[in-house]
Image (cartoon, rainbow, N blue to C red):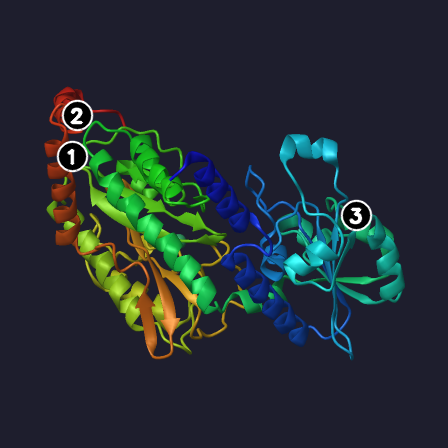
Amino acid sequence: MRPKFFSHLCLAVALLLLSEPGSPSDTQLREEARERRMAYLQRVKEGVTLLFNRRHHDLNEYVPDKNFFYLTGCTEPGAVLLMIPGEDGPGETLFLARRDPKQERWTGARMAPGPETARRLGLQEVLSLDELPDALARRVPPEGKVYANLPRGPHRQATDKCCPEPWVRLRRWLPDAEILDSGPEVAFLRMKKSQWEIEKIRRAVEITIAGHRHALPAIGPGRSEYEVEAAIEYQFRSRGATRPAFPSIVGSGPNSTVLHYAENNRRMSSGDLVVIDVGAEFDGYSADLTRTYPVSGRFTRRQKEIYNVVLAAQKAALEQVRPGATFDRDGSIYQAAFQTIDSRGRDRQGRRLGRYFIHGTGHHLGLEVHDPVSDRSRPLEPGMVITIEPGIYIPEENLGVRIEDDVLVTRDGYRILSRGLPREAEEIERMMRESRATAGSRNTGGPARDQAAMETQEVGGPGL
Ligand SMILES: [Mn+2]
């Protein structure tokens, strides 16, 4: 092919790919968001709803507010969505900051207010943020109700006194309005996932499984927890995940008993267990998968005993997963897990093990790794995605075991989305053997030899 023709062809293909309206997934996202807004306004038939795209809490990098994103598919910082239910159809207006060409030289192109963006996002209108106060004054009666995405935590109850922007502004614009939390209403919708969302979670799970599998060669006496973390997160990003959905937990030995341990800087030794609790975020959706591995490649008898109690508890809990089951501590799922743990095995003092199962059986999974719920006692429905993750943590024995899978509730029960990652004790040991054999044959001067060398140095034993 002549070079010039070829370069023109490339250009044409590139333009085609870049052209509006977006890739198929953009179109799908726009439709999803439109349906969600309709469902929302069918539930909240009064007042107005105002969703601010504030920074998602407790993350350093910019992540859009999850409720705002859920209802718009838009990630523009500072944007505000106004929704008003109405007799003759709902009103939906998005407010965006005006473009600033100088700023865009630093941080890239932004969406602009106007009909073009409205078409792209499938919204009725997209106005400039400066127009928001007037629009509110026009459309909200002085003492009307305003549902807003109030901040979580200590600010939630104190929106009038100490809340950060933009709630200060909201109060200034509407001094007499009754400001309510839109969170539970949006959470109600978010609890049930669409096919499209389930596919996103499935992809996040797939990437997370790859992370676990590729971590195995980095597990061994003398290796550091952070090597395992790095191996996992390398897989995440290489496979298109945006980021880890939460700080990766690689806890060995005593750290295996610390639920949210994330320093990951201890050197592992041969008799340790290592709890690996990680999850990739893909297109905004999270996975959350835990396995517990023996650092030496083989469980001790005691470790295997406890491991099998946790596994039995997970299986007992899974058997209870079906539409109608409840997920709180009074529900059948938690009870099945707890009873299994409390009725098998003992600690060194001969006590039952229930006291070492110190967290719930799981949580909902979606745009957030701990996806919000409208009501803890709401029974499960098909399309909900949850984790099932019993654990036993015995600090006196430096022994922590957690097994966590991601589970879709179906019409007649459940499907384990993460079934591709083995969890039987024998399978775990076999996986570790195989990964070592591969690492060894691939490069005899590499990891396998280093590992042997470190195993020898380890005689003095790293401190706990
Ligand atoms: Mn979890």
| Image position, residue 165 (x, y; %) | 74, 44
Number of labels in the image equals 3
At a point 12% along the width and 22% down the height, the residue shown is: 456
In the image, what residue type sits under mark 1?
Ala
| Quadrant where the C terminus is found in the figure | top left
Q: Residue placed farthest to the front in the image?
A: 2
For disc 3, the marked residue is 168
| Quadrant where the N terminus is found in the figure | top left
The reply, left or right, for residue 380 in relation to residue 179 is left
Does residue 208 appear anywhere in the picture? yes
In the image, what residue type sits under mark 2?
Gly
Q: Which mark is residue 439?
A: 1
For disc 2, the marked residue is 446
- Mark 2 element type: loop
Check disc 1: other Cα within 10 Å, few if <14, some if 14-19, many if 20+: some
At a point 11% along the width and 26% down the height, the residue shown is: 444
Give the mark nearer the N terminus: 2 vs 1: 1
